[in-house]
Image (spheres, rainbow, N blue to C red):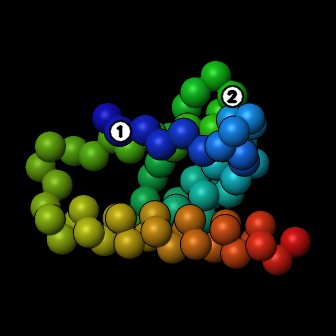
């Protein structure tokens, strides 16, 4: 299992719960199932099977990357 904690500000470490929820929603639409975790719901959890191929992993990471870019763009726009 791997987790990524998302915060709005690195100094204050304010949890980015809304952004985490949006990334998980977009990833699900893209075919990648992620799990929210953490006390504040601001951690994205990955549970990849041990039998995952390199191609499947690369595809999943590409979807995840697109989700992060989309949410970052939303934040920048407004």
In this image, 67 relative to 58: left or right?
A: right
Q: Residue at x 21, y 44 (%)?
A: 49
Q: In this view, which residue lies farthest toward the front? A: 11
Residue closer to the observer: 55 or 69: 69
Structural distance between the alpha carbons of marks 1 and 2: 17 Å
- Measured as percent of width and height from the top left, residue 44 is found at 51, 43
Residue 12 placement: quadrant: top right
Q: Secondary structure at mark 1?
A: strand
Residue 15 placement: quadrant: top right
Give the class, few, some or many, for how many residues have Cα within 10 Å of label 2's Cα (few <14, many ≥20).
few
Say whether marks 1 and 2 touch (CB < 8 Å).
Answer: no
Q: Secondary structure at mark 2?
A: loop
Q: Residue at x 31, y 71 (%)?
A: 59
- In which quadrant will I find the N terminus? top left
- What residue is pinned by disc 1? 2
The dot on residue 40 is 2
- Measured as percent of width and height from the top left, residue 18 is found at 75, 48
Q: Which mark sits nearer the N-terminus, 1 or 2?
A: 1
Q: Is residue 45 above or below residue 71?
A: above
In this image, 49 relative to 45: left or right?
A: left
């Amino acid at each position: 299992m791997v987790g990524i904690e998302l915060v709005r500000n690195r100094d204050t470490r304010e949890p980015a719960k809304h952004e985490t929820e949006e990334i998980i929603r977009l990833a699900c639409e893209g075919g990648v199932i992620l799990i929210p975790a953490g006390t504040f719901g601001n951690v994205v959890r990955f549970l990849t099977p041990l039998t995952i191929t390199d191609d499947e992993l690369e595809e999943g990471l590409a979807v995840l990357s697109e989700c992060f870019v989309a949410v970052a763009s939303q934040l920048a726009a407004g």
